Amino acid sequence: MAVPVISAFYGGLLGVLAVVLAVLVINQRQRTRIGIGDGGDQRLALAGRAFGNFIEYAPLALVLFVLLELCGGPRLAVHLCAGGFVVGRIAHAFGISRSSGTSVGRFVGTILTFLSMLVAAIWLIVLTARQL
């Protein structure tokens, strides 16, 4: 079985992004001296949601990309899906950390996140349905 090196690369990028987002939460906690919850601090709430939203989507997305690669999906498809997801998560985190309302970053990030996951999922269905 081939090692999913493309997915591993993007998994590494996502790992770095997760740490960056977590550190932003920790820094805001230290500034505000709020250990649990957000204590009504808007910046802490936004940093927490940026991290939380990332963690809600990244694991499933990474599983989809690994499976797509292992099931013989085209290398370009894996790069486009995983790369689009990483860019989407960065855009979303930037947008949500700046405002609790709508923003270009959140919009673009959401579209790229859902599109990359949906394309990977559909590609997996197509690739594997022939083998069922």
Image (tube, rainbow, N blue to C red):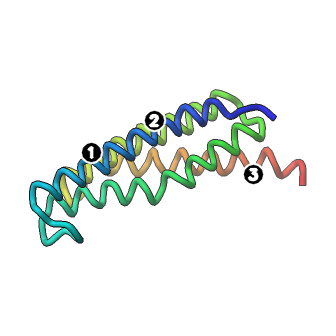
- Residue flagged by tag 3: what amino acid is it? Ile
Q: Residue at x 81, y 49 (%)?
A: 128
Which sits earlier in the primary sequence, circle 2 or circle 1? Answer: 2
Q: Residue at x 57, y 46 (%)?
A: 62
- From the image, tell me which residue sits under label 3: 125
The image quarter containing residue 76 is top right
- From the image, tell me which residue sits under label 2: 13
Q: Residues within 10 Å of mark 2 (few under 14, many from 20)?
A: some
Question: How far across and down, in percent of the image, does residue 57 sit?
Answer: 48, 55
**Mark 2 to mark 1 CA distance (whole Å):** 16 Å
Quarter placement of the C terminus: bottom right
Mark number, residue 94: 1
- Residue flagged by tag 2: what amino acid is it? Leu
Q: Residues within 10 Å of mark 1 (few under 14, many from 20)?
A: some
Q: Is residue 105 left or right of residue 126?
A: left
Position above or below: 78 against 132: above
